Amino acid sequence: KQWYQRRVRGSVPEMQISNFRKTPLFYVLLFFACGFIIMAFQSSISEESSLHDPSFGTLHVDINGSKIALYNYKPKHTPKRTVFLLHGMKYSKETWRSLGTLETLRDHGNRAIALDLPGYGGSSAIHKDFPRQLFLKEFIEFFDNRSPPVIISPSMSGEYAVPFIFTYPHLLGGWVPVSPVSLNTHHPSEYSKLSLPVLAVYGENDAQFRPKVEDLLSKVPGAELVMIPAANHPCYLDNPTLWHSSLLDFLSTL
């Protein structure tokens, strides 16, 4: 009898749970719980996959209150280095994606990050008093760079890159200027004092910038100059094959 009473008393909670499972509220709660688990799982997959596949959408980071849009192409294994790609006035991060530069860099073991500069594409503007070289410094340092990174700076983006390399040259492992503006903001003697691997790329038909590149960037000790035949100012668009091979050859020496 005592055993029977203990068995009955112990089974009351089990009976309550069993009865609760038969109520509509139980199925409503179960539905939402399953939905939450599925959403959390998909979110974790998307977040991780977005590091490797930008088809998941543009990523954003906050730099000094400005929302900066970027693509982040990351190899499956530990990257050899990080390459930051800036852009010209008429272009954006999408230029490097459609040209295949991001994919090429990633497939050769590099992490490639292309951004929309402040006020362009999907990025908001920065305060007019915020120095552009400081913006670039904070953007680069936002990421975990295992070794000094490389920056690619065509045309207009020289307004960011040129003051940056003269202010923070120790933060870089290499510089790839592509007919950049702002070269004349520094005296030729200053270029001869730069201690930084440089690959200067320019187009044969770029009458405005070719002389500046050949005159000033040739003074950087050890600088390599690559002229793309029959190419215009955005020379990488005229010969992507030569552009990519020259870039990869340069990176292999770092």
Image: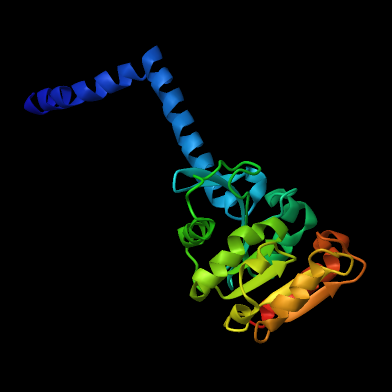
Query: At which x and y percent is residue 184?
Result: 67, 68
> Against 36, is 104 above or below?
below
Say which quadrant the C terminus sits in: bottom right
**Image point (69%, 68%), residue name:** 177
Image vertical order of residue 162 relative to residue 128, above or below: below
Q: Is residue 83 visible?
A: no
Number of numbered tags placed on the structure image: 0
On the image, the x and y values in percent for residue 111 come to 60, 64
Residue at the image position 69 percent from the left and 66 percent from the top: 105
Would you say 70 lies left or right of 235 here? left
> Residue at the bottom extreme?
222
Nearest to the observer: residue 213 or residue 138: 213
Q: Quadrant of the N terminus?
A: top left
Q: Is residue 23 left or right of residue 94?
A: left
* Quarter holding residue 196: bottom right
The residue under the point 64% across, 70% down is 109
Q: Which of the two residues, 235 or 220, is positioned nearer the viewer here?
A: 220
- Which quarter of the picture shows residue 186? bottom right
Q: Is residue 223 above or below residue 230?
A: below
Quarter residue 206 falls in: bottom right
Residue under the image location 75 percent in, 72 percent down? 213
Let me know if residue 30 appears in the view: yes
Q: In the orientation shown, which residue stands out farthest toward the top?
A: 24
Q: Position of residue 219 (x, y in %)?
A: 68, 83
9 up-or-down from 36: above or below: above
Q: Nearer the viewer, residue 104 or 45?
A: 104
